[in-house]
């Protein structure tokens, strides 16, 4: 029995890479899928219908149901129209996978304003805009006596969790996604809306741009690819299920490994019977400061 039968799903940035793998896995599980993708280059230039239509054709070829979308997730009105498309064409909506993204890498001391604005717009506003309109639909359904077991699945990155040179815009947006998901989990609880985050390690067009991406390696002699995007899609398919128990969680996923991350976690604490001074903090905190985790340590250790 298909575990996602009758589920209606939107996947943003689904024309290539991880998003494409999500769309294919969800359709294989029985979901009807809106394949949203602008068909842009990695830096967000251009609009092309081909990638979204191609994924829909793949899904249709094996008997699945999918509709392409070129809506701009960073546009509030386009995000609303994307939700309406699912409701009008498939009769409802159960899951949103926020995956769309672009890169405009540059050290912050050289970054231009548009390089900041465009990346934050697609990643953070794009997550928020689609989530906002999906939540409004689910709230309306619940108040009308038709609650849906809704799931929002967001995409963060080790560049946000750990930092990465040249990615102040991307890293800030990706850490913002974690905060966004935590608020959604609280606000959506009353209406049956779950919200979770995945930090993926997979080989895509975007990882090819990252410093250290060569550490992702290549498929082994048997053909197993630890950094194939299909491994991320398996976790997304689980989170998309109506009965999935996960909520307000952050996962790091690579290959055959899933890590549940604690964000934030108290690493140390100091107390005093007197007010702290800069001098007393020197000694009290000297041995308690944590070493920063490098962006690719999540992959390698």
Image: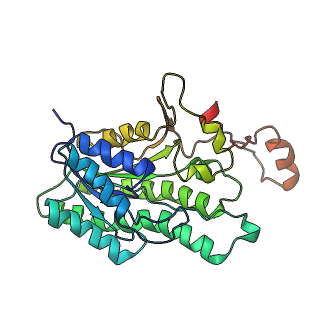
Q: Residue at x 65, y 59 (%)?
A: 167
User: Residue at the right extreme?
Assistant: 279
The C terminus: image quadrant: top right
Up/down of 107 relative to 58, above or below? below
Horizontal side of residue 156 vs 296, given as left or right: left
- In the image, farthest residue toward the left: 145
Give the residue drawn at x 28%, y 44%. Answer: 26
Instruction: Tell me, yes or no, if residue 269 can be seen here.
Output: yes
Instruction: Tell me what residue is drawn at x 18 percent, y 36 percent.
Output: 2
Q: How many marks?
A: 0
The location of residue 189, given as percent across then percent down, is: 30, 53
x and y percentages locating residue 151 in the rendered image: 30, 50
Residue 79 occupies which quadrant of the picture? Answer: bottom left
Nearer the observer, 129 or 245: 129
**Residue 195 place in picture, x, y as percent:** 37, 51
Horizontally, residue 292 falls left or right of residue 71, namely: right
Asked if residue 28 is positioned above or below residue 207 in the image, the reply reads: above
Question: In the image, is 40 to the left or to the right of 188?
Answer: right
Q: Quadrant of residue 54?
A: bottom left
Residue at the image position 57 percent from the left and 62 percent from the top: 103
Colouring scheme, one of rainbow, by chain, secondary structure, one colour: rainbow
Q: Quadrant of the N terminus?
A: top left
Q: Is residue 95 visible?
A: no
């Amino acid at each position: 029995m298909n575990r996602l039968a009758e589920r209606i799903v939107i996947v943003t940035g689904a024309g290539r890479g991880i998003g494409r793998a999500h769309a294919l896995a969800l359709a294989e599980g029985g979901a009807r899928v809106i394949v949203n993708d602008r068909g842009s280059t990695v830096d967000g230039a251009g609009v092309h219908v081909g990638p979204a239509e191609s994924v829909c054709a793949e899904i249709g070829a094996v008997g699945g149901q999918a509709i392409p979308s070129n809506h701009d997730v960073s546009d509030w009105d386009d995000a609303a129209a994307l939700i309406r498309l699912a409701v009008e064409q498939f009769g409802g909506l159960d899951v949103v996978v926020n995956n769309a993204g672009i890169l405009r890498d540059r050290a912050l001391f050289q970054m231009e304003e548009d390089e900041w604005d465009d990346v934050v717009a697609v990643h953070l506003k794009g997550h928020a805009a689609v989530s906002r309109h999906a939540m409004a639909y689910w709230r309306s359904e619940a108040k009308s006596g038709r609650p849906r077991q809704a799931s929002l699945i967001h995409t963060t990155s080790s560049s946000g969790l750990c930092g990465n040179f040249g990615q102040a815009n991307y890293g800030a947006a990706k850490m913002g996604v974690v905060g966004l998901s935590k608020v959604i989990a609280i606000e959506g609880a009353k209406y049956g809306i779950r919200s979770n985050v995945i930090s993926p390690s997979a080989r895509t067009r975007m990882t090819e741009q990252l410093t250290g991406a060569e550490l992702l390696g290549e498929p082994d002699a048997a053909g197993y690819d630890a950094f194939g995007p299909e491994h991320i899609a398996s976790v997304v398919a689980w989170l998309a299920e109506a009965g999935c128990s996960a909520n307000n969680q952050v996962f790091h996923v690579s290959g055959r490994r899933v890590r549940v991350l604690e964000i934030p976690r108290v690493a140390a604490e100091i107390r005093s019977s007197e007010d702290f001074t800069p001098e007393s903090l020197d000694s009290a905190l000297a041995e308690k400061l944590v070493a920063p985790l490098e962006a690719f340590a999540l992959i390698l250790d």
